[in-house]
Image: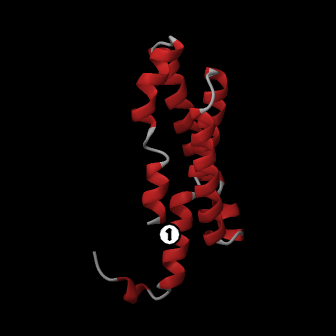
């Protein structure tokens, strides 16, 4: 359920982007900037956040990550500044980079024995 919620606040980009671009009179370059910012920040932080994820409770990371990501989405909806949207969407990438690793840490704590996790 937690990861599905992370996807909900990450994959909504396609729904709001066309209307934002037309309202701001922005082009495809600006759309690419928004998407690229998210992906670059998300990918690089997913590699670098491993230490933080192992030091902090994954349940706290999931809870605060979902709340912060929701706030970022609200912030994007309430601004008309494209540079601010890029910053906020990059921040969402940083927050989202804690999602899947935290889910796997919770899963591994629930099923510490590899035999109890089932077979592929």
- Color scheme of the displayed model: secondary structure
Q: Residue furthest front?
A: 78
- Taking the image as shown, residue 11 lies to the left or right of residue 50, namely left
Name the residue that disc number 1 marks: 104
Above or below, comparing residue 40 to residue 18 in the picture: below
Residue in the picture at 61% in, 64% down: 63
Q: Judge whether residue 45 can be spotted in this image.
A: no
Report helix, strand or loop for mark 1: helix
Q: Residue furthest left?
A: 120
> In the figure, residue 102 lies in which quadrant?
bottom right
> In the figure, residue 99 lies in which quadrant?
bottom right
**For the residue carrying disc 1, how many other residues have a C-alpha within 10 Å: few (<14), some (14-19), or many (20+)?**
few
Residue in the picture at 38% in, 88% down: 115
Above or below, comparing residue 10 to residue 24 in the picture: below
Q: Position of residue 112 (x, y in %)?
A: 50, 86
Q: Judge whether residue 21 can be spotted in this image.
A: yes
Q: Position of residue 61 (x, y in %)?
A: 64, 64
Residue in the picture at 67% in, 72% down: 57
Q: Position of residue 19 (x, y in %)?
A: 43, 23
Q: Position of residue 3 (x, y in %)?
A: 46, 61
Above or below, comparing residue 39 to residue 4 in the picture: above
């Amino acid at each position: 359920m937690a990861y599905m919620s992370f996807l909900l606040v990450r994959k909504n980009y396609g729904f709001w982007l066309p209307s934002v671009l037309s309202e701001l009179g922005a082009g495809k370059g600006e759309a690419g900037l928004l998407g690229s910012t998210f992906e670059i920040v998300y990918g690089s932080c997913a590699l670098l956040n491993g230490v933080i994820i192992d030091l902090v409770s994954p349940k706290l990371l999931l809870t605060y990550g979902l709340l912060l990501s929701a706030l970022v989405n609200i912030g994007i909806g309430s601004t008309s500044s494209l540079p601010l949207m890029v910053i906020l969407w990059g921040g969402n990438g940083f927050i989202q980079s804690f999602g899947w690793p935290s889910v796997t840490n919770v899963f591994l704590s629930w099923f510490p024995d590899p035999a109890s996790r089932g077979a592929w």
